[in-house]
Amino acid sequence: MAEKGKVRRARFRDVEAVYEVIRENPREVLPRSFQNLAQNFDRFFVYERAGEVLGVISWQAMPVLDLKRPDWTIEVMSFSVRKAYQRQGIGHALLTRLLKELENYDPDRILVLTFYPEYFRKFGFRKTSKEKLYSKIYVGCLNCTRYRSPLTCPEVAMEIMKKRRTKGGNKG
């Protein structure tokens, strides 16, 4: 009987495997430097089976650009499963675990940029306009080496709206 895998928080010793899993899907996942992964390993979850990391997922908090009306947004990123193990429920297990963990941070919304909107729709994500994602553009898209403009990138912006906040920043 095949061993069942598990999702767990990444550890320092997982950084090399995380690096390799991300690099295995260069069209779908933007590369990250080894040093960036080492500095942010605590934002990763890995799917491990028989001691091997088969999938990874991470998150980042987006900057607050309007202090009077803060938008507490978290982005799902670096979501990758080794090609030989795709379509086995690994991605589902990773994304389910991450979304559960992100609830602890009480975000206004959870954001993802993806080439696979139908996949994320199953988890409650809905398409949104890239023009509204100033914090994402500020953090990552302006430094993207693949596309000249965030608005010409073919990835689809999707979000799960968790709550709306009133003008004073209180939940409402």
Image (tube, rainbow, N blue to C red):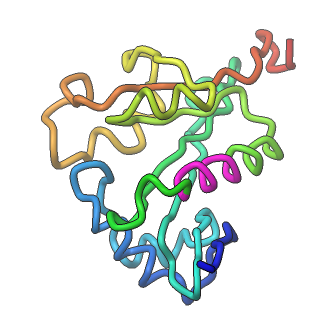
Q: Position of residue 97 (x, y in %)?
A: 70, 53
Residue drawn at the location 44% of the way across and 52% of the way down: 87
Note whether 75 is above or below 80 in the view shown. Answer: above
112 lies left or right of 51: left
Residue at 30%, 54% (x, y): give it: 30
Percent across and percent down for residue 131 are 37, 16
Report the quarter where the C terminus lies: top right
Question: Depth check: 140 or 45 in front?
Answer: 45
In the image, residue 44 above or below residue 29: below
Locate residue 40, reporting x and y percent. 54, 69
**Residue 155 found in image quarter:** top left
Image quarter for residue 19? bottom left
From which residue to which does the magenta span run?
Answer: 90-98
Q: Is residue 93 magenta?
A: yes
Principal secondary structure, stretch drawn in magenta: helix
Residue 42 position, x and y percent, is: 64, 70
Residue 36 is left or right of residue 98, and the answer is left
- On-image quarter of the N terminus: bottom right
Instruction: Determine which quarter of the picture holds residue 163.
Output: top right
State the residue in front, 169 or 5: 5
Q: Residue at x 58, y 69 (%)?
A: 46
User: Considering only vertical position in the picture, is 105 above or below 111?
Assistant: below
Identify the residue at the far front of this view.
1
